Amino acid sequence: MVVRKLRIFWWFSGNISCSAAAAARAIQRGAQNPRRPPSRRPLSIDLAMLRLWRCYQNCLAVHPVKTQVISSGILWGFGDVGAQMVSRWTAAPQARQKEEGKDIKIDWRRVVTTSMFGFAFIGPVGHYWYEYLDHIVRFHYRLHPKSLKFVTAKVVADALLLGPLDLLIFFSYMGVASGKGLKQVKEDVKRDFLPALPVDMAIWPVVQFANFRYVPVKQQLLYVNLVYLFESSFLSWIEQQGNAPWKKLFTSKNTRIALISDHPDIS
């Protein structure tokens, strides 16, 4: 079971990293050529996607903060629905057998809670963060846009500042929103932060390198939110795992040794 959880853990990171560059290229092409629809899908789908993209671009031009706040909330809500589906899929065999034949029940209260995190934190903070970061690196440090130094400086700043802060606030918020006391929230953050941080530090430099290299500043939060469809599923899955034994591998050398002795199949 521990090995299976770890495989799922790294499956998340692999899939997110592999799709990041492709998403960045797609948004870059959409921003540069908004009138050219894809050629391999039915025309009705092409027109719908083109209209949706134009609507987003128009809203972004007129109401940039509101547009990014609303889109962040929606995408984080979808991400949590995915997390609940993944949690059902990764449940123990006994639990899956009990659920077979039953309709999949979505915890809509949890979806709304997660969506509010995207609405209240990711949207407004992300909007100002990417604009401010670009301004500082471009004008204060006078680095040429799209150069290796320019992109690297933004990646390092994002990884060291926004990344860990995002994790801390997410796990703290989810604990408080679920009605837990401050002491329990603190314990949950300690339990969940360290397992999530290595994957976050492995994924997001790759994701953000593509973002800062190819995506215009105005679309960078949209790109991040699309990746967050997977990331929010991963974070929600981490939070839903509770006191899973595999988390101890990230929190203490002593517990890691004890866990390996109890579960020799993980070594």
Image (cartoon, rainbow, N blue to C red):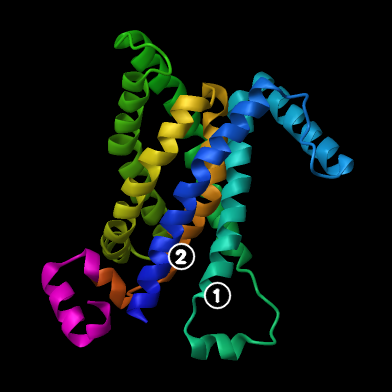
Q: Residue furthest right?
A: 44
Q: Is residue 185 left or right of residue 28?
A: left
Mark in front: 2 vs 1: 1
Residue 245 on image: x %, y %: 29, 77
Give residue 89's mark: 1
Numbered circles on residues, count: 2
**Residue with the mark numbered 2:** 237
Task: First in sequence, mark 2 or 1: give its number.
Answer: 1
In this rendering, the answer to whether 255 lies above or below 149 is: below
Residue 119: in sight, yes or no? Answer: no
Amino acid carrying label 2: it is: Trp
Circles 2 and 1: CB atoms closer than 8 Å: no
In this rendering, the answer to whether 238 lies above or below 142 is: below
Amino acid carrying label 1: it is: Trp
Spatial CA distance of label 2 from label 1 is 11 Å
Residue 193 on image: x %, y %: 30, 57
**Is label 1 in a helix, a strand or a loop?**
helix
The residue that appears at 31% across and 64% down in the rendered structure is: 188
Residue span colored magenta = 249-267
